[in-house]
Amino acid sequence: MNTRPFLSVDADDIASCVACGLCLPHCPTYRVTGLDSHSPRGRIALVAGVREGVIELDGNVIESLDTCVQCMGCLPACPSGVRYDRIIGPVVEELTSRRPRKKLRRAMTLAPLGRPKVLRLMTILAAVVQRLRLMPRRFGLRNLPLRTARHEKSTSSGTGHVVVFSGCVMDAWYSDVHRDTHAVLAAMGYNVSFSDPGVCCGALHAHAGLYTRAETLEKRVRSTLAGATIVVNSAGCGAHLRETFSDSGHEATRIVDVMEFIDENIERLTTGSIASSDHPRDRVVIHDACHLRNLQGSYLATHRVLGHFYDALPMPDEGLCCGAGGAFAIEQPGLARMIVDRKFTALESAVDDRTKFISSGNPGCLGHMTAHKPRSMDHIHVVHPVHLIARLVGDRKREIP
């Protein structure tokens, strides 16, 4: 490429940053390194300098931009309303395109997504590697299944129809979350079906800068699911699906996180499905997935729902990212480990012998925190919040994975 870098970034978006620094406490990489170049305002300044030809796009600049987790914690923190997402997105895409080997590696890594048979085969192979204890911890993978789990059959006895988004990783690796989502929604009286697991939302591709592939997948999602109420149990997928259906031509399509949906219809759960006086008040600490807190803005629904049945506490770390960030934990293992270690250090002030669970609504967070949970917290399970509701529904007491 001979053109000056980052011309695709809107100059007005860059100019809207006044470098006040109020984003700094909300940036996980700045919090662990203390480097301004690892903060949103620092990265914006670097993009502006390169775009204007004042700064060369050298290794140091690329390293600073590569180490953004894309958690978007700076979005709600910024008093000027800087759209950092519209700045870092084109930057990541361009940096990926400028490095053909990295682009090929990322494309090959994500190639199984949207291809269920290939993903299931890769899952089985990865499960074997896990059982041989050859899988690096930084990959943040849960114990993967050796057998393909079947979807719960669609229910037709309820009133009101909802579609649970199957997704790719959720379908292959977190079928227990789908099972429990189905159990809870069916107990609430809904007619539940699942989307085709071959319909990938493209979230991980967009995060990796593979926008051409992401756009192809987004078009398929729009053509397949338009007009439905889509319940999503992966925060990352939910945020990307909301963006996919955000234009004015898709008002009839609703994307809603599973805990937000339960919260909106909590009376269906508390007036029959669960007799609230019968449950023990186990303590659960809630980690707010970045895509729920910073992009969807629906994170408090999890606190409200779990608060009905558990002693629910917020994670005492101001809602900072855990460091999973798509493939961030794989590509930046050192920083990712520093970020998650900081989270567990903060957590020590909130846990005691009554603390049984850490809850998170995103698969990347679940895997990353489980992989790096300190031994002192072996008694605490890292779980999706829908597990904690499903174990209380009727007589179907769920084993915690």
Image (cartoon, rainbow, N blue to C red):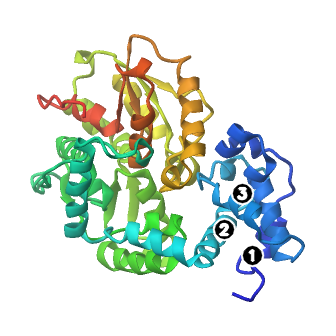
Is 134 located above or below residue 114 in the figure? above
Could you tell which of marks 1 and 2 lies nearer the N-terminus? 1
Q: Residue at x 50, y 49 (%)?
A: 329
Q: Secondary structure at mark 2?
A: helix
Circle 2 residues within 10 Å: few <14, some 14–19, many ≥20: few
Is 264 located above or below residue 231 in the figure? above
Q: Residue at x 27, y 60 (%)?
A: 166
Location of residue 354 by image quarter: top left
Q: Which residue is mark 2?
A: 86
Location of residue 170 by image quarter: bottom left
Is 258 located above or below residue 46 in the figure? above
Using the numbered discs, state the Cα–Cα distance from disc 1 to disc 2 in whole angstroms.
Answer: 8 Å
Q: Where is residue 399 shown, x and y percent of the image? A: 19, 30
Q: Residue furthest bottom?
A: 2
* Quadrant assignment for the N terminus: bottom right
CB of mark 1 within 8 Å of CB of mark 2?
A: yes
Q: Where is residue 102 shown, x and y percent of the image? A: 53, 70
Q: Identify the amino acid type marked 2.
A: Arg
Circle 3 residues within 10 Å: few <14, some 14–19, many ≥20: some
Q: Which of the two residues, 108 or 273, is positioned nearer the viewer here?
A: 108
Q: Is residue 39 left or right of residue 322?
A: right
Q: Which of the two residues, 230 or 363, is positioned nearer the viewer here?
A: 363
Q: Identify the amino acid type marked 3.
A: Ser
Q: Which of the two residues, 272 or 308, is positioned nearer the viewer here?
A: 308
Q: Residue furthest right?
A: 54
Q: Residue at x 39, y 67 (%)?
A: 110
Question: Residue 64: which numbered mark, if any?
Answer: 3
